[in-house]
Amino acid sequence: MNGARWLVQALEAEGVETIFGYPGGAIMPFYDALHGASLKHVLVRHEQGAAFAANGFARASGRVGVCVATSGPGASNLITGIADAMLDSVPMVVITGQVATPLMGTDAFQELDVFGMTLPIVKHSFLLRSVDELPNAVSEAFRIARSGRPGPVLIDLPKDVQIGNAEHLGAHIPSQADTMPACADHALHEAAALISQAERPVVYGGGGIILGDALEAFREFADLTQIPTVLTLRALGALQPAHPANFGMLGMHGTRAANLAVQESDLLIVVGARFDDRATGKLAEFAPHARIVHLDGDGCEIGKLRDTDVSVCGDVATSLSRLAAPCAAQMQGRHAVARSAWRELCAQRRETFAARYDAPGNKVFAPALLKRMSELAPDAVVACDVGQHQMWVAQHWRFDHPRKHLTSGALGAMGFGLPAAIGAQMEDMSRRVVCVSGDGSFMMNVQELATLKRYRVPVKIILLDNSALGMVRQWQELFFERRYSEIDLSDNPDFAEVARAFGIQALSVDKAADVDAALQALLAADGPTLLHVAIDTAANVWPLVPPNHNNAQMLDADEVTSLDVGAPAAPAAEPVATASKESSHALPV
């Protein structure tokens, strides 16, 4: 029983079933210890794929994802995936091999200070110096990763610790995650009082809803109060798509109905959101007339970017449950007529500004394709890469649960989609998993097609190919006077042939009339399959809030030609609680 074998047994005791990794010199004792273990090891083809796969596993399941790599370049290749987990609060335990302790600090072969390199992007790090430190490190790593606001924890494991005698160590006993404290009563009373005074309240829900196991409480609050609700990218699915209080995503590529509701609100009830710049637009003009009630399990987020009138720090689920009934009763109080008119206005805007899918011409219209796929596969977990396709998925896929939408939110890491989809699928091989990627993102971890093939992971890939770095091209078109710089991907390979070379089935579609049949064929295919979709290089994501503008100043395609979108922002619009269709559309840009 050496340190490596003890660690493998400890992982089994923690309930770990699947790990993602890539072997090398400094982690070889651990790989030797995997022989005969119950752990399923998934051999990826690049360490970044291991980190993203563990990341996708954790996002889809809510359990701790585990990835392993050797020292030096193996460890450094994990860093992007670790950073993504930290910024999106994903529970992970990352195990890296390290040179033997006598060699540390000598610039030995494949030695890197991964402990120091990852300090800003982990919740905690352990650099072990002896076998005796293993029990505490493993126990604390899993406890910290799960507790409070989840995140990644690093265990840097020198080779001599792995081969050291561990006969004297007892069996590993997992530690329980810390319990989230309840919010103070006075804060809930103050929140309820402020909500009772509001005529134009809006709920602004974020990723903290699912992180805090508050989904059911959030839905109950929405059912009882019927307060118009907007969601961040990470919170999509927190309300059912057809829920009358659901006004969709806010922010840079959010719905016009959601953004206008926020900008004209007199109270924002912020639930597990952090006022991210992509959600708020120009922060100084975000919801300029709204008072703020902020519920969050992480007190560091409350008041960080926007002063709050009432801070409700603690268990979000408990706080929402305690607020739901009194707030619902207050909705019928002295401001009931004004609130009813507010809901009607928001609903009218949702209908007026609903997305259209009747694009002219015979080319594939990506939003229509994604909407149709959402209808054909309503149960699917979607792992999305980063770029225009990411925003189209957020806008047009009708998610009914946040854990069905896996996306690199805060870091925006291209290359996330395919390995994250593999991780989500390996967590449950019976579920339907779809990867939506773009031609730029897909090439960043294309080697993981080999992982799909080896393990027969039945992920379905929709590859939207516009022969460009689409989001960068769109910004260069709109904000850099069409000076296109290094966005041309017209020399892409034939992606269907690339997939077939890896042993993956592949289909292609380039006409709108053929989309439905292609999607049906993709879903009916047995095993991993790629659908290559050729789309217009000039296609843009609409609507769009330009930089340095507030969220009421959204642009659509027909507004761009007559506007100087690079000009300084106009003053924020005054809120108009009873604005007509025409006046709401004419807010300054």
Image (spheres, grey):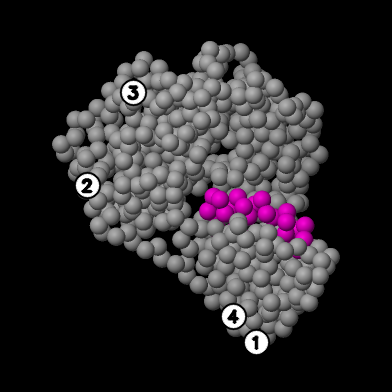
Q: Nearer the viewer, residue 547 or 22?
A: 547
For the residues carrying marks 4 and 1, which lies nearer the camera in this image? 1
Q: Amino acid at mark 1?
A: His
Pick whichever of labels 4 and 2 is earlier in the sequence: 4
For the residues carrying marks 3 and 4, which lies nearer the camera in this image? 3
For the residues carrying marks 2 and 1, which lies nearer the camera in this image? 2
Residue furthest toward the left? 334
SS of the residue at dot 2?
helix
Using the numbered discs, state the Cα–Cα distance from disc 3 to disc 4 in whole angstroms: 62 Å
Pick whichever of labels 3 and 4 is earlier in the sequence: 4
Is 586 inside the magenta-drawn segment? no
Badges 1 and 3: C-beta atoms under 8 Å apart? Answer: no
What residue does disc 2 label? Answer: 193
> Which residue: 19% across, 35% down?
335
What residue does disc 1 label? Answer: 168
Q: Which mark is residue 459?
A: none
Using the numbered discs, state the Cα–Cα distance from disc 2 to disc 3 in whole angstroms: 28 Å
Q: How many numbered callouts?
A: 4
Q: Residue 560, position in %: x, y?
A: 54, 17
SS of the residue at dot 4?
loop
What residue does disc 4 label? Answer: 171
For the residues carrying marks 4 and 2, which lies nearer the camera in this image? 2
**Label 1 crowd bin: few (<14), some (14–19), many (20+), radius 10 Å:** few
Q: Amino acid at mark 4?
A: Ala
Q: Amino acid at mark 3?
A: Gln
Using the numbered discs, state the Cα–Cα distance from disc 4 to disc 2 in whole angstroms: 52 Å
Q: Amino acid at mark 2?
A: Ala
User: Is residue 433 placed above or below 154 in the rendered structure?
Assistant: above
User: Is residue 371 placed above or below 446 in the rendered structure?
Assistant: above
Pick whichever of labels 2 and 3 is earlier in the sequence: 2
